[in-house]
Amino acid sequence: MPDTILYTAEAVSSGDGRNGHVTSSDGRIDLDLAFPPEMGGTGAGSNPEQLFAAGYAACFHSALRLIAHRQHSELRDSTVTAQVSLGPEGEAFGLAVTLVIHVPGMEREKVRGFVDAADQVCPYSRATRGNISVELRVL
C-alpha cells in the first residue's frame, strides 16, 4: 500500500461481466463490453484486456519519460505498446504482457537502461511482478 493515496479511480461493471457495461465514477469511461471473436464473442465492445493494455501502456510510458527526464534526456516521439494476452492456465485463466518500447533516434542500449529503471518505478510493473509474465521489448 502506498504511504499516501494521491488518487483513487473507481469503475463499476454491470450487466453480464465481459458482455456487460463499465462506467467510471467521473463518466469518462462509459463502455459496452463484449467477448472478442477469438473467444466466441461478437467483438461489438471493448474488453478488460484492452482496458488493461491501455492503462499499462500509458503508465509505463509516463514512468519511462520520468526516468529519462531525471537523467536529462528527452524521449521524442516515444511510444509504448502493451500487448495483453489471455489464456487458460490450468483450471483458471492467466495473463501475459509484452511491452514494446520505441524511441526513434536514441541508442538501443540507452533506451534499455531507461526501460529497466522505469520497470522498477511503474506501479503496473510493480503490481504484476512475479504474478504474470511481462516481456520488455525495446525496438
Image (cartoon, rainbow, N blue to C red):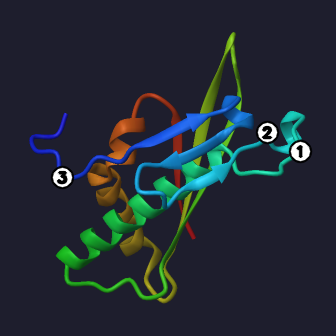
Q: Which residue is the site of mark 1?
A: 42
Who's the residue at 10% across and 44% down the image? 4
> Where is residue 63, by image quadrant?
bottom left
Who's the residue at 68% across and 45% down the image? 47
Relative to 120, residue 58 above or below: below
Mark 3 and mark 2: Cα distance apart in space: 33 Å
> Residue 30: horizontal and vertical position, in percent?
58, 54
> Residue 64: horizontal and vertical position, in percent?
35, 67
Who's the residue at 47% across and 53% down the image? 56
Mark 3 and mark 1: Cα distance apart in space: 38 Å
Q: Which residue is the site of mark 2?
A: 35
- Amino acid type at image mark 2: Phe
Question: What element does badge 2 sit on?
Answer: loop
Who's the residue at 28% across and 46% down the image? 8
Question: What element does badge 1 sit on?
Answer: loop
- Amino acid type at image mark 1: Thr
Q: Which of the two labelled residues, at mark 3 and mark 1, occupies the earlier sequence position?
A: 3
Relative to 36, residue 101 above or below: below
Mark seen at residue 28: none
As drawn, the residue found furthest toward the top would be 91
Q: Which of the two labelled residues, at mark 1 and mark 2, occupies the earlier sequence position?
A: 2
Relative to 128, residue 56 above or below: below
> Residue 13: horizontal and vertical position, in percent?
56, 36
Whether the residues at callouts 1 and 2 have beta carbons within 8 Å, the answer is yes
Q: Quadrant of the N terminus?
A: top left
Q: Which residue is the site of mark 3?
A: 6
Whether the residues at callouts 3 and 1 have beta carbons within 8 Å, the answer is no
- Amino acid type at image mark 3: Leu
Q: Which of the two labelled residues, at mark 3 and mark 2, occupies the earlier sequence position?
A: 3
> Residue 17: horizontal and vertical position, in percent?
66, 30
Question: What element does badge 3 sit on?
Answer: loop
Judge by depth and name the residue closer to the eye, 115 or 6.
Answer: 6
